[in-house]
Amino acid sequence: MRMLLIHSDYLEYEVKDKALKNPEPISEEQKKGRLEEVLAVFMSVEKADETNPDEVVEKAVVEIKDVASQVKAGRIFVYPFAHLSSELAKPDVALKVLQRIEERLMEEGFEVKRAPFGYYKAFRLSCKGHPLAELSRTIVPSG
Ligand SMILES: Nc1ncnc2c1ncn2[C@@H]1O[C@H](COS(=O)(=O)NC(=O)[C@@H](N)CO)[C@@H](O)[C@H]1O
């Protein structure tokens, strides 16, 4: 899994078109989303993650919690992003991993939004620009 973490004043998105034949079903209200004072986490789930998705979820949560505590962010935006890797996991595995990361972060007490999976989306992001505002992490299953 490849993650790009951007500490932001806000992240907002708007769903445009389908990018997959069968994107994640979404409600009308999920077609737009915005969070202020947020740690935006752009994530590409990778082929290698398919060997142990549960382990990758836990490792990703550890990394996200670590960065969130360093930048003092209480809100997380989980953003599916297929452009951080050339070895993408298949969509059904990727969606499950991202849904599970969302659930685990909520369990950890964060306010969390997740951008819809399988759609082209317009988005605006305001990066805060401090030294820890732009970080990346790579997670691989140990198996
Ligand atoms: N492995 C993945 N990790 C994260 N997001 C993914 C992944 N696979 C698919 N997606 C989601 O599905 C959307 C489309 O994925 S894509 O790989 O860019 N495009 C496609 O698969 C099709 N356009 C056929 O190539 C992405 O924008 C993202 O929302």
Image (cartoon, rainbow, N blue to C red):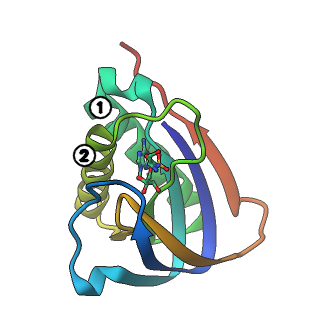
In the figure, 22 relative to 51: above or below?
Answer: below
**Residue 108 horizontal side relative to residue 18, left or right:** left
* Dot 2 beta carbon under 8 Å from ligand 1: no
Kindly identify which residue carries mark 2.
96
Q: Quadrant of residue 105?
A: bottom left
Q: Position of residue 77 (x, y in %)?
A: 44, 68
Query: Quick one: label 1 or label 2, which is nearer the N terminus?
Result: 1
Q: Which mark is residue 101?
A: none
Q: Amino acid at mark 2?
A: Lys
Q: Crowding at label 2, few (<14), some or many (≥20) Cα neighbours within 10 Å?
A: some
Please give the name of the residue rendered at 32% of the width and 26% of the height, measured from the top-left corner.
Answer: 50
Q: Amino acid at mark 1?
A: Pro
Q: Crowding at label 1, few (<14), some or many (≥20) Cα neighbours within 10 Å?
A: many
- Is residue 2 or residue 109 the one in the foreground? 2
Q: Position of residue 16 (x, y in %)?
A: 45, 76
- Is residue 123 or residue 126 the one in the foreground? 123
In the figure, 59 relative to 61: above or below?
Answer: above
In the figure, 93 relative to 65: above or below?
Answer: above
Q: Quadrant of residue 91?
A: top left
**Residue 69 horizontal side relative to residue 133, left or right:** left
Q: Position of residue 123 (x, y in %)?
A: 56, 76
**Residue 81 horizontal side relative to residue 137, left or right:** left
Q: Position of residue 2 (x, y in %)?
A: 54, 40
**Distance from Cα at disc 1 to Cα at disc 2:** 9 Å
Contact between labelled residues 2 and 1, with CB atoms less than 8 Å apart: yes
Q: For mark 2, give the secondary structure.
A: helix
The quarter of the picture where the C terminus appears is top left
Q: For mark 1, give the secondary structure.
A: helix
Kindly identify which residue carries mark 1.
53
